Structures are given as C-alpha cells and as structure tokens.
Image (spheres, rainbow, N blue to C red):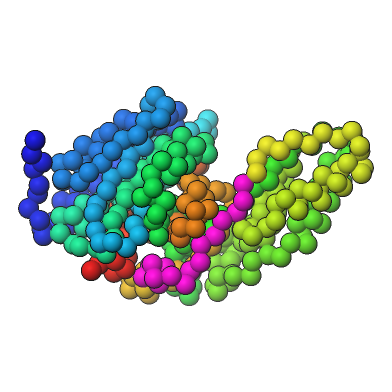
C-alpha cells in the first residue's frame, strides 16, 4: 500500500482556505444535532489520509464517531487541538435562513455549527495541513481530536477518548473552544481567551419551604465564598460581557431545582453540607436529590503557550487578550481536571456574535475563518517550532 504524499515545503494559502471553506460547507450541511458524527469523522479521516497523516475513528456507540489524528513531532508532551462534531439543535425559533444548508452567501457560511464547533474543527484541520505541507518540525506531537457528543456532556466522546488514550492524557496543552471572540472598544480590539469554566451544583429540593427562602439562603452561602478578582482592564468590555455572572458565584432556580454556578476552587462538598443542613432544619421531611455535580476548572496563564497566544494576537493590529471564565462547561473540563493546561481560543473577528452560539442565525464570515486559521497557525508555530 502506498500513501501518496504531497510535495513538502509547499503551501498555497489561498488553496488551503478554499479547501477549508468547502469542507465547512459540507460539514454544516450534515445535521449532527442528533448524533451522527461518524459521517463527519470518517470524512475528515479521508482528507487526512490523502495528506499522509494518520487518523483513526472511534465509535463506542453506533453513529457516535470521534476522530483522533496524529502529526508526529519532537519529544515534548503533546499539544491537543480539540473540537467537537455534534451541534446544539437548531431549535424551534425562526432562522433567517435554513439552519442546515451550509450556503455561502454575502461572504458568510451559514448554518448551525458554522462556529460551534465545526468552524473550529475545520480551522484546526487547516492548521495541521499547513504545518504538514510546509514540512515544519515542531518540538512535540500534535493530536487533532474532533469528538462526538460534547453538547450532551462529552461522555461518549472526549471523556471516553481520554480514558483510553494515554497520549492524550500525557498532553501539556490543549487549544480548544470557549473563547476567541473579538470585541471592538474605544481602547482597541480585544479577544477573549477562556482559561477556566465554572462548576455546577444542581439540586432538586422537595420541601414545604418557600422557594424564595431557599434562594435567599443559597445566595447568602455563595456570597461567603471568595470570588476571583481578575477582571479585564477595559470598563467598556466589562459592560459588554455579563461579568457579574462570569466572575462571581451565582445561584438561580428552575422550578424546584436550585442551580449553583461556582468558580473554580469552590468547595462543593462544604456548600452542599451547609445547604442541606439548613433545608433539613427548616423541614425535616425535605427531599434533596443531586442532579449535577461538576467542579469548576482553571488553567494558569503564566505559561509558554499563553505568552505566545498573547504575543501573536497583539501582532495583528495591537489586539489585547483577556482571560475569562465561562459560566457553562465543555469538554475542556476533562482535560483541565487531568492537570493539562487548556485555552479556549477560536480566534474570530468582531463580525461574529457570541449570541449566535446555540442561538438563531449562526454563521461565520470567510474573513473570520481565515483570520482564525492564520492566527492559530502563528501561535502554534511560534510556540513549538524547533
Ligand atoms: Zn461547542
């Protein structure tokens, strides 16, 4: 068997970008909100085989395929490029265009997943192809992981892979989703970089105590926990982001369910004990059931990769990088809880709106797609080139 390898040390960026656009259109046009990721995983694997890059599709449940590709480098602990192949459903609300067309119109690829996370999967793949075609030697292996089932909690995808793949557990860094959005402010442009995710403690409470009394006590409890003080410098940016929710512990309810969103480092066990003992004192017959128990996770920023990320972002028009924590969580938490440093960084221009993620009208401009590919390429080669 012979693998046809392209001529090395040659890259035509315009050809690569054209390939990326075509691939993203194809991927968006396949609805993976119900778990048929294997179709895309196998398609990407074929793209990689043609380049002489090893890839494997894992399918622990029928249709739920995840892709792992490997580009060899030096002996340092690996870099993982992490994305996912499933999407949130398009939902009932009216879309301004068909959500699964993948049409290219007015310079934008339209449809569910164009950003989250098929846009990032394609950007990661393009970076891998660029490094391979140019014959660039890095000080470490790159593993490209495009997983199944992220939107439903990641057990069939990232968590399953991580449990079975020692090379992934041995990684030093992961570049993933969760950040990268660009914001234009009077003091210049900023890109968010996700360095952590809040945890969640979700408890269903059946009791005679009025919900308001429960919530008031829950608020007192979370108010006692120290909050992170690392705030972005730009006041304007603070106003644009929901920082109240991001940078403090919060509590809300959904019917009889009390949902705590908690910063990394919060002692969930202590909180749970204090909360349940209060409820039981008020109503000895109260029933409390744990619906969700997830610790928050955070990665430090005084690292080689984060420095490169900041530096390369700044080189483009002096844009600043703002570390932040997302209130929701993703597959990133599986890697962070192994001690791996994870940065959620999908660089996008300010023309892409965070509200499109899981919302209506998701799309990505070709200029944003191109910007993301080039910036990620610059960051990875600046940090790890031999
Ligand atoms: Zn996502």
Let me know if residue 30 is in the magenta part.
no
Would residue 266 be seen by someone viewing this image from the given angle?
yes
Quadrant of the drawing holding the N terminus: top left
The residue under the point 71% across, 65% down is 226
Q: Residue 52 location, x and y as percent? A: 15, 45
Quadrant of the drawing holding the C terminus: bottom left
Count the numbered circles shown: 0
The residue at the far top in this view is 62
User: In the image, is 198 to the left or to the right of 214?
Assistant: left
178 over 311 or under it: above or below:
above
Let me know if residue 299 is in the magenta part.
yes
- Residue range of the region highlighted in magenta in the rendering: 294-310
Observer-nearest residue: 371 or 365?
A: 371
User: In the image, is 1 to the left or to the right of 322?
Assistant: left
Q: Residue 56 location, x and y as percent? A: 28, 38
Q: Residue 98 location, x and y as percent? A: 39, 32
Q: Residue 359 location, x and y as percent? A: 50, 42
Observer-nearest residue: 234 or 197?
A: 197
The residue under the point 62% across, 46% down is 294
Would residue 96 be seen by someone viewing this image from the given angle?
no
The residue under the point 72% across, 50% down is 269
The residue under the point 38% across, 67% down is 305
Observer-nearest residue: 264 or 109?
A: 264
88 over 18 or under it: above or below:
above
């Amino acid at each position: 068997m012979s693998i046809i390898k392209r001529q090395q040390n040659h890259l035509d960026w315009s050809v690569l970008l054209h390939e990326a656009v075509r691939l993203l259109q194809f991927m968006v046009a396949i609805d993976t909100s119900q778990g048929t990721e294997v179709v895309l995983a196998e398609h990407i694997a074929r793209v990689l085989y043609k380049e002489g890059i090893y890839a494997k599709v894992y399918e622990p449940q029928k249709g739920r395929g995840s892709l792992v590709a490997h580009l060899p480098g030096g002996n340092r602990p690996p870099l993982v490029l992490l994305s996912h192949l499933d999407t949130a459903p398009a939902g009932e609300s009216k879309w301004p265009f068909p959500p699964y067309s993948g049409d290219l119109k007015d310079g934008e690829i339209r449809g569910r997943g164009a950003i989250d996370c098929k846009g990032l999967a394609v950007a990661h793949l393009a970076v891998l192809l660029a490094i391979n075609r140019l014959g660039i030697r890095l000080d470490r292996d790159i593993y490209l992981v495009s997983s199944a089932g992220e939107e439903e909690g990641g057990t069939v995808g990232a968590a399953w892979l991580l449990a079975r793949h020692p090379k992934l557990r041995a990684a030093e860094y992961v570049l993933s989703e969760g950040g990268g959005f660009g914001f234009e402010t009077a003091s210049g442009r900023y890109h968010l970089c996700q360095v952590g995710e809040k945890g969640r403690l979700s408890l269903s409470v059946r009791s005679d105590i009025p919900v308001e009394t429960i919530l008031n006590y829950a608020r007192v409890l979370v108010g006692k926990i120290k909050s992170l003080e690392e705030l972005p410098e730009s006041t304007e940016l603070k106003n644009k982001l929901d920082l109240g929710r991001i940078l403090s512990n919060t509590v809300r309810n959904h019917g009889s369910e009390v949902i705590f969103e908690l910063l990394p480092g919060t002692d969930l066990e202590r909180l749970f004990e204090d909360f349940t003992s209060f409820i039981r004192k008020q109503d000895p017959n109260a029933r409390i059931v744990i619906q969700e128990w997830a610790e928050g996770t955070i990665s430090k920023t005084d690292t080689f990769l984060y420095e490169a990320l900041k530096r390369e972002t700044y080189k483009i028009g002096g844009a600043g990088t703002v570390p932040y924590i997302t209130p929701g969580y993703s597959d990133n938490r599986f890697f962070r809880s192994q001690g791996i440093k994870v940065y959620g960084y999908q660089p996008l221009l300010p023309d892409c709106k965070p509200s499109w993620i899981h919302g209506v009208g998701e799309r990505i401009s070709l200029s944003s797609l191109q910007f993301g590919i080039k910036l990620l390429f610059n960051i990875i080669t600046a940090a790890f080139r031999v």
